[in-house]
Image (cartoon, helix red, strand yellow):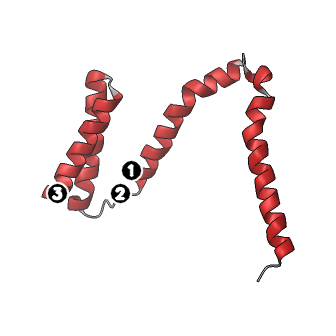
Amino acid sequence: MPSVGYVAAALGIGIAITFALRALPFALGSAIKNSEWMADLGRWMPLGAVVVLAVHQVATIDYGSVSSAAPYLAGLAATIAAHLWRRNVALSIVAGTGVCVALSAIL
């Protein structure tokens, strides 16, 4: 069992790091306010997060069984098709999710 001092030190370090990470953007606010790099990061970060999530999900599909892979791949295809058709994120998400859930229930 860890000592009280060890737990207090670990807790203090965690609190200090959390506080520093929360305060850092405010401390650097004037330096990053007109930064071209931050503007680029703000434009590309949402797309990057979606790509990472999509690649992870496609990589976890069990391709050994058609009945388990088909709903996910059809949902992915529906999402892509709806987005290319209307360029509407909400419609793409609803279409892909609906196709995936419907096929999962049927198969």
Q: Quarter-wise, where is residue 88 in the image?
A: top left
Rounded to the nearest angstrom, the CA distance separating label 2 from label 3 is: 17 Å
Tag 1–tag 2 contact (CB < 8 Å): yes
**On the image, numbered disc 3 is attached to which residue?**
105
Badge 1 is on which residue? Answer: 58
Amino acid under label 3? Ala
Q: What x and y, as percent, mark residue 27?
A: 81, 30
Q: Does label 2 or label 3 sit earlier along the sequence?
A: 2
Q: Residue at x 76, y 46 (%)?
A: 19
Name which residue type carries label 2.
Ile
Residue at (40, 57) in percent of width and height? 60
Task: Identify the element where label 1 is drawn.
Answer: helix
Query: In the picture shown, does residue 38 fall above or below 12?
Result: above
**Percent of width and height locating residue 93:** 31, 37
What's the amino acid at mark 1?
Answer: Val
Q: Which mark is residue 61?
A: 2
- In-image side of 38 versus 77 (left or right): right
Check disc 1: other Cα within 10 Å, few if <14, some if 14-19, many if 20+: some
In the picture as drawn, the residue positioned furthest to the left comes out as 106
Mark 3 or mark 1: name the one nearer the start of the chain.
1
Numbered disc 2: secondary structure: loop
Q: Residue furthest top?
A: 34
Residue 36's spot in the image, x, y percent? Answer: 69, 18
